[in-house]
């Protein structure tokens, strides 16, 4: 169950730090983290309910 819930969690905020250190696009990585966090509000409960229905 933990592995299923981890698949629905947002991408880590350290992506922006890695983008800065390695010369990547920091603004884009910040947007990706923001949207993945917003989507996780919906995806975590859905994945949890699907998991419960399959058990």
Image (cartoon, rainbow, N blue to C red):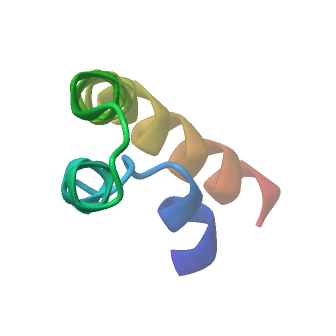
Furthest residue in direction front, as rendered: 23
2 over 28 or under it: above or below: below
User: Residue 14: x percent and y percent?
Assistant: 23, 61
Residue under the image location 58 percent in, 45 percent down: 47
Nearest the viewer among 55 and 45 is: 45
Furthest residue in direction right, as rendered: 54
3 over 22 or under it: above or below: below
Query: Would residue 5 be found to the left or right of residue 40 on screen?
Result: right
The quadrant of the image that shows the N terminus is bottom right
Query: Would residue 39 be found to the left or right of residue 54 on screen?
Result: left
37 over 44 or under it: above or below: above
Location of residue 37 (image quadrant): top left
Residue under the image location 42 percent in, 40 percent down: 45
Query: Would residue 27 be found to the left or right of residue 52 on screen?
Result: left
Residue under the image location 24 percent in, 61 percent down: 21
Q: Is residue 1 among the parts visible in the rendering?
A: no
The quadrant of the image that shows the C terminus is bottom right
Labels in figure, total: 0
User: Residue 36: x percent and y percent?
Assistant: 37, 32
32 over 45 or under it: above or below: above
Location of residue 35 (image quadrant): top left
Furthest residue in direction bottom, as rendered: 2
User: Residue 12: x percent and y percent?
Assistant: 30, 58
Q: Is residue 24 among the parts visible in the rendering?
A: yes
User: Residue 41: x percent and y percent?
Assistant: 29, 31
Residue under the image location 63 percent in, 57 percent down: 52
């Amino acid at each position: 169950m933990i592995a299923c819930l981890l698949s629905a969690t947002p991408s880590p905020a350290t992506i922006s730090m890695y983008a800065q250190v390695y010369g990547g696009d920091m603004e884009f990585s910040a947007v990706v983290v923001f949207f993945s966090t917003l989507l996780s509000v919906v995806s975590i409960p859905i994945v949890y309910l699907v998991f419960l229905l399959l058990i």
